[in-house]
Amino acid sequence: MNLPPAVVCVDLGKTRCRVVLVAGTEQVDEQIAPGLPGLAQPGAPERTAEVIAELVSRLAGSDGAPVGVGAAGALSAPDAAARLAELLAATLDAPAAVTSDIVTAHLGALSGRAGVCLVAGTGAVALGVSADGAMSRRDGLGLMLGDLGSGAWIGRAGVRAAELAQSGVGPATVLADRIPAARDAATLAGAPDAATRIARHAPTVLDAAAQGDEVASGILTAAATLLAQTAAAASADVGQSDVVALGGLTGSEVFLDTLRAALTSHALTLRDPDGTALDGARILATRRDLLLEGYIHRAHA
């Protein structure tokens, strides 16, 4: 019996690097490591190639398998993305394709079709793609300037609300008890992992909102409104009204319900995603007819 060809799929963010060996649509093996700062950083292609190659070497049956990589920073640092593709192809002796992690998220969520992919995790970004391959990216600007409605945004709002309630300045909220050392979060300012650590409070806020806490519910509604505005901006740019949502926040039913209502107010429809960013990495490695081909960097051994 002929086995389906193997593909190495890489989802590399700033929080986590996940490398999966897939045969057909079945996951065969997996390796996980901490994320990296992004391809825009000095020396990032070389360091990233080393990390990915080491993880791939631990995957049984990965020899010669094509590699698809979605990496944070690839859109803003295309030369680094191209260099990473070259290094991986040479090191692994296999074809390599590199693009942004938001592009692989879009590919996985929409199977290469046009539409808007809204990623709502630690950060927040929307990528819209038109039927003729035009692209619009909205937000993704980081904790200081953007990522509006993201896990970090929600977590920060929750910490602020808890501290205000604890000090008697703001309205009462269960967050005051559930985020007991809210003021300590101020020490995170400027820390490299500040967004990730603040985002850890987002599930607490969402749980409180689901239980009817008015302050938490207000934070959730505001976050969904901001995310819907981001998606609407990308939608207007590319003429697409279907939106798929990915990211850690989408594991919450109360979040999805609130987001769906906010999108509806912009005449947008929330659709279920076809797959994940790892599915997008597989599509990236195995297809050459993609709408976003111009943002993909390919190299051969």
Image (cartoon, helix red, strand yellow):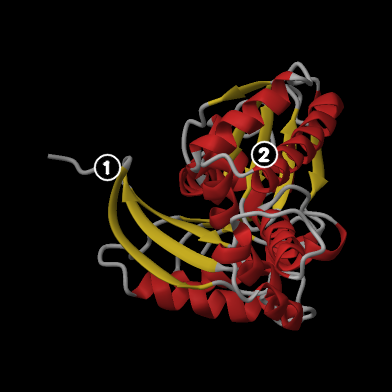
Tell me the residue that label 1 is attached to: 4
Q: Amino acid at mark 1?
A: Pro
Tell me the residue that label 2 is attached to: 118
Determine whether the residue tagged by mark 1 lies in a helix, strand or loop: loop
> Where, by quadrant of the figure, is residue 267 drawn?
top right
Asked if residue 246 is positioned above or below residue 121 in the image, the reply reads: above
Does the rendering let one see residue 79? Answer: yes
Q: Nearer the viewer, residue 236 or 223?
A: 223
Instruction: Give me the residue at 31% from left, 68% from top.
Output: 59
The residues tagged by marks 1 and 2 sit, at their Cα atoms, a distance apart of 31 Å
Q: Badge 2, how many Cα within 10 Å: few under 14, some, many 20+? A: many
In the picture, measured across the screen, residue 167 lies left or right of residue 253, that is: right
Across and down, in percent, residue 248 comes to 54, 50
In the picture, measured across the screen, residue 41 lies left or right of residue 26, that is: right
Across and down, in percent, residue 85 comes to 61, 64
Seen from this angle, which residue lies furthest top?
Answer: 267
Proximity of marks 1 and 2: CB atoms separated by less than 8 Å:
no
Across and down, in percent, residue 164 comes to 77, 64
Instruction: Give me the residue at 79% from left, 61% from top.
Output: 142
Instruction: Give me the residue at 49% from left, 36% from top.
Output: 253
Across and down, in percent, residue 126 comes to 73, 41
**N-term-proximal mark, 1 vs 2:** 1
Q: Nearer the viewer, residue 61 or 37?
A: 37
Q: Nearer the viewer, residue 134 or 35?
A: 35
Determine whether the residue tagged by mark 2 lies in a helix, strand or loop: strand
Instruction: Give me the residue at 69% from left, 47% from top.
Output: 215
Q: Amino acid at mark 2?
A: Leu
Q: Nearer the viewer, residue 199 or 286?
A: 199
> Where, by quadrant of the figure, is residue 58 drawn?
bottom left
> Where, by quadrant of the figure, is residue 204 drawn?
bottom right
Does the rendering let one see residue 298? Answer: no
